[in-house]
Image (cartoon, helix red, strand yellow):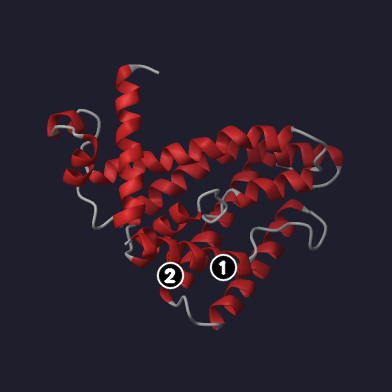
Amino acid sequence: MKKGDLKRAQILDAAEKLFFEKGYDRTSVQDILDALGMSKGGFYHYFDSKEAVLRAVSERRAEGRFDKLAAELYGGRRSSIDRLNLLLGMANLFETEDIRFAALMLRLCYVEGDASMRAHHRRILLDRLAPYMADVIGEGVRDGSFHARHPAEVGRLLLLLALDADEEACAMLAQEPENPDVMLHMLELLNAWREAAEDLTGAPFGSIRLFDAGRLVSAWQTGAALLNEGV
């Protein structure tokens, strides 16, 4: 790793640790500098703001997930439907190895309403997952699992719907985390999304899934508790 890349990674490591320990809002650029013994000039050589650091942290975490995706997607004997469901799971904010980061992003993007960070996260997923979606839908058309005359376009549309559904579910959860009706609303949303996805692809009824509403609620509660402990 080049010296510049190493220093950049050290800034991201220190910032991420502070975001978990103190909370994103309570962490300042000066806190990051103090943790590293770094000058302001050294920091601003790599990043122009705390927000830019968080975007870079998000990108790095996404890249880590995508590095593993190809092996999971094409390794073994998965069916086209299984591959599609694996890809759709990537659109779920809480399908991550570190639940604290998902809770941090949910709080920032949906509780505090940071539309810029939400759009940034969505763009990363859309740009990286769309080619895989086109490939998997095309494979499914060839083996008879799906029926679509325009696989790439159907794949992108399906991904857009998945991202919309995930955003809607996260918004519900952020607004009323203790309301039991939220679960029912999520289930209704997921059922409507599944019907639309199966209509788009011609997949068998009940074969496509996005995420489990109960798991999403449980993951958010766990992540929020971990973050609260840190703060």
Residue 144 % position (x, y): 86, 43
| Left or right of residue 214, residue 103 in this image | left
Residue underneath mark 1: 218
Tell me the quarter of the image containing the N terminus.
top left
Confirm or deny contact between disc 1 and disc 2 (CB under 8 A): no
Closest to the observer, 192 or 199: 192
Q: Is residue 57 above or below residue 24?
A: above
Earlier-in-chain disc, 1 versus 2: 2
- Name the residue type under label 1: Ser
Crowd band around label 1 with a 10 angstrom C-alpha radius: few (<14), some (14–19), many (20+): few
Q: Is residue 45 above or below residue 3?
A: below
| Left or right of residue 57, residue 221 in this image | right
Q: CA distance from mark 1 to mark 2?
A: 13 Å
Tell me the quarter of the image containing the C terminus.
bottom left
Q: Comparing marks 1 and 2, which lies closer to the viewer?
A: 1
Closest to the observer, 115 or 95: 95
Residue 10 % position (x, y): 32, 32
Indicate which disc residue 174 carries: 2
Q: Residue at x 74, y 57 (%)?
A: 208
Q: Is residue 27 visible?
A: yes
